[in-house]
C-alpha cells in the first residue's frame, strides 16, 4: 500500500511531532513524514526534525502582510512536498476557511482535553477550576472553529487531587504521544470515513469496559 505523505505543522517544542515521526518510522506504518513547517523560526522542534533528515523550513507568519498571504505560502509548501495529510502538532495559528476547505478531512489536530469540553487555551487550568475529575486529549479533523471537527480518537486521563496545571499537562501530554500516532494510523490506513460530520470506523469497534474514575475500590 502506498504510504500517505504527511506534513506536520508546529509552533514550538514539537514533542507530538516527534511522537508522530517516531511512529511513522516503524515498519508497516501507513504514512511517512515528508515535511515539518513552523510559523516560528525559533521553534525547538525544527532542529529535531532537521536532524532526522526531514525538510523543516520556517514560514514566519510575521513576514506576511496578512493571514491569507501566510496561508498561501504554507499551502504551496505542502503542495511542493506532495503532502496527502496534515497534522497540526502544537501549531498556534488559527487557519482561515480558505485553507481549511482546501485540506478538508485531510487535516488533523490534537487538543489536550476531551472535546467538545475545554476548547481553547489554558485548558488544564480551566479543567482544574471546574473540578472535572477526568480530562484527556482528542485528535480531530480541523474545521474553522477552534478545536472543533469530527473526532477521530480520544484518551481519558484522570485528574489527581493534588494536580497543578503543569502536572496535569504532563500526564495528558504522555497520553497525547500515544494517541496521535494511533489516530494517524487509523486515518492513513483508510479506517476512517466522515459521514454527517462524524467519524465512522471500518471495521466498527466492539464492546469495551466503562471507564470510571475514581475506580471502584
Ligand atoms: C500539546 O499539548 C498539544 O495538544 C497542544 O499544544 C501542545 C503542543 O506540545 N495543542 P508539543 O509542541 O507537541 O510538545
Image (cartoon, helix red, strand yellow):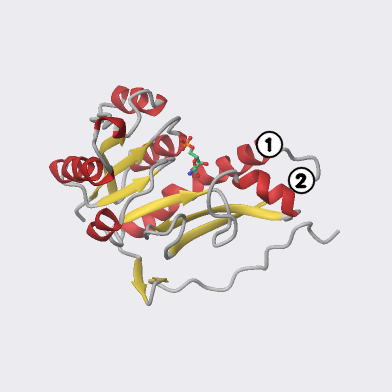
Mark number for residue 167? Answer: 1
Most foreground residue, 155 or 121: 121
* Real-space Cα separation, disc 1 to disc 2, in angstroms: 9 Å
Q: Which residue is disc 2 drawn over?
A: 160
Q: Earlier in the sequence, mark 1 or mark 2?
A: 2
Looking at the image, which residue is at 67% across and 68% down? Answer: 210
* Residue 194 as seen in the image, left or right of residue 163: left
Q: Measuring from the top left, give residue 172's x and y in whole percent.
A: 60, 44
* Callout 1 secondary element: helix
Q: Measuring from the top left, give residue 16's x and y in whole percent.
A: 45, 39
Most foreground residue, 90 or 158: 90
Q: Quadrant of the N terminus?
A: bottom left
Looking at the image, which residue is at 28% across and 61% down? Answer: 104
Q: Is mark 1 within 8 Å of ligand 1?
A: no
Furthest-front residue in view? Answer: 65
* Residue 49 as seen in the image, left or right of residue 117: left
Q: Quadrant of the C terminus?
A: bottom right
Looking at the image, which residue is at 52% across and 73% down? Answer: 206
Name the quadrant containing residue 192.
bottom left
Q: Measuring from the top left, give residue 73's x and y in whole percent.
A: 19, 40
Name the quadrant containing residue 194.
bottom left
Q: Residues within 10 Å of mark 1 (few under 14, many from 20)?
A: some
Q: Do tag 1 and tag 2 residues touch (Cβ < 8 Å)? A: yes
Most foreground residue, 159 or 60: 60
* Callout 2 secondary element: loop
Looking at the image, which residue is at 56% across and 41% down? Answer: 173
Furthest-right residue in view? Answer: 217
* Residue 140 as seen in the image, left or right of residue 47: right
Amino acid at each position: 500500500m502506498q504510504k500517505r505523505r504527511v506534513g506536520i505543522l508546529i509552533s514550538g517544542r514539537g514533542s507530538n511531532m516527534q511522537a508522530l515521526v517516531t511512529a511513522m518510522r516503524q515498519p508497516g506504518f501507513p504514512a511517512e513524514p515528508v515535511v515539518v513547517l513552523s510559523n516560528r523560526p525559533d521553534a525547538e522542534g525544527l532542529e529535531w526534525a532537521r536532524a532526522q533528515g526531514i525538510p523543516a523550513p520556517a514560514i514566519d507568519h510575521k513576514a506576511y502582510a496578512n493571514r491569507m498571504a501566510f496561508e498561501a505560502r504554507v499551502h504551496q509548501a505542502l503542495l511542493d512536498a506532495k503532502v496527502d495529510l496534515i497534522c497540526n502538532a502544537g501549531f498556534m495559528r488559527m487557519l482561515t476557511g480558505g485553507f481549511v476547505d482546501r485540506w478538508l478531512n485531510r487535516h488533523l489536530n490534537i487538543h489536550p482535553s476531551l472535546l467538545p469540553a475545554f476548547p481553547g487555551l489554558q485548558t488544564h487550568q480551566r479543567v482544574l477550576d471546574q473540578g472535572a475529575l477526568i480530562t484527556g486529549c482528542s485528535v480531530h479533523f480541523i474545521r474553522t472553529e477552534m478545536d472543533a471537527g469530527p473526532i477521530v480518537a480520544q484518551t481519558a486521563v484522570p485528574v489527581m487531587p493534588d494536580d497543578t496545571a503543569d502536572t496535569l499537562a504532563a500526564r495528558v501530554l504522555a497520553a497525547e504521544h500515544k494517541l496521535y500516532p494511533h489516530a494517524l494510523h487509523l486515518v492513513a490506513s483508510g479506517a476512517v470515513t466522515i459521514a454527517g460530520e462524524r467519524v465512522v470506523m471500518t471495521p466498527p469497534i466492539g464492546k469495551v469496559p466503562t471507564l470510571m474514575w475514581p475506580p471502584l475500590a
